[in-house]
Image (cartoon, helix red, strand yellow):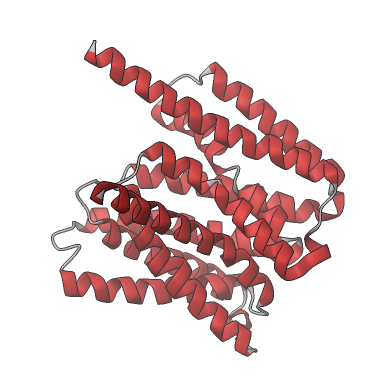
Amino acid sequence: MAVSNKNVWNYAGLHLAILSWGAAGVTSKLMTTDPAGIVVYRSIIAAIVLGLFCSLTRKGKGVSKRDQAYMIATGAMIGLHWWGFFAAIKVSTVSIALVCISSAPIFVALLQPIVEKTALKPSQILLGIISVAGIGIMFNFEYEHRLGIAIGLAAGAIDAVYSIMTSRTRETISNVYVTQMHMIGAFAVVMLISTAVDPSMNWLALETRTDYIGILFLGLVCSAIAMSLYVISIKQLSAFTATLSLNLEAVYGMIIALAVFGASEHMSPGFYIGAIMLVGSVVADAMLSSLNARKQVIEEMA
């Protein structure tokens, strides 16, 4: 009975984290702050909170400068991903941005064989074709939102690079410390690029009460707390469960967006057909990966 209750708490923690990430897009849409400013505030707040935790628990002690530099570089990818995600929301809708960034696992499936110098599997090629077809349908039916779709897909591709880089981080390093380094990298890259483009730093302006509340929500709840809940949960649950559950971020986010923004978040039937093809490909890839992993374990035991 105790094990069952533990699993319930792990599932609850996992889905609370995913729900908060789904709400992040809606929060940014309500804010007047520039996407770059949102990322800078979000990442620095999370970095400070996680840094305090790491200092109190002595996490990250003995980590080499080389590993720190790699983690910061990896964090730069999540910073660019968030920047693209929030920018896509500003120029289109929350629903479009969420569906587009959910393409990340497909990009991982296509990019990882290149990085690891292995052949693409027929299933990956097929799912890639289905995903591209789904994207094409979305472009066709939501042509007025083509810029948002393009930025969202770019954010999805960057997220794939982030995932691949993260998977190559030393497993012996504390996950909380890794996340802290990622937040520092996210802050640094967006701060440097945005300052170079606009030295006046008007993009950091917080003009309304909603901006201040939104920044705190994104930094504390969606980053520091959600990342901690996610890390704790996936250590107790299967990788398949975690991967499959992550696809609900788009679903949760779209439901919240429809509740908050109403008609402006309603898309054409063609968009939803394309979205189902894209997200369906991601789910199918997760299921096939799980089946292949189980098959490999059985073969090794035989």
Q: Disc count in the image?
A: 0
Residue farthest to the top?
Answer: 302
Residue 163 rendering spot, x and y as whole percentages: 44, 45
Side of 298 relative to 224 (left or right): left
Whether 213 is drawn above or below 300: the answer is below
Whether 57 is drawn above or below 154: the answer is below
- Answer whether residue 40 is visible to the viewer in this image: yes
Side of 231 relative to 79 (left or right): left
Q: Quadrant of residue 130?
A: top right
Residue 64 rendering spot, x and y as whole percentages: 18, 56
Q: Nearer the viewer, residue 199 or 225?
A: 225
Q: What's the residue at 43%, 41% (across, down)?
A: 241
Rendered-image quadrant of the C terminus: top left
Q: What's the residue at 36%, 71% (across, down)?
A: 47
Whether 279 is drawn above or below 200: the answer is above
Q: What's the residue at 60%, 83% (across, down)?
A: 211
Residue farthest to the front?
Answer: 1
Side of 150 relative to 239 (left or right): right
Residue 288 rendering spot, x and y as whole percentages: 49, 25
Residue farthest to the left?
Answer: 62
Residue 105 rendering spot, x and y as whole percentages: 53, 39
Q: What's the residue at 63%, 39% (across, down)?
A: 279
- Answer whether residue 70 is visible to the viewer in this image: no
Q: Nearer the viewer, residue 40 or 9?
A: 9
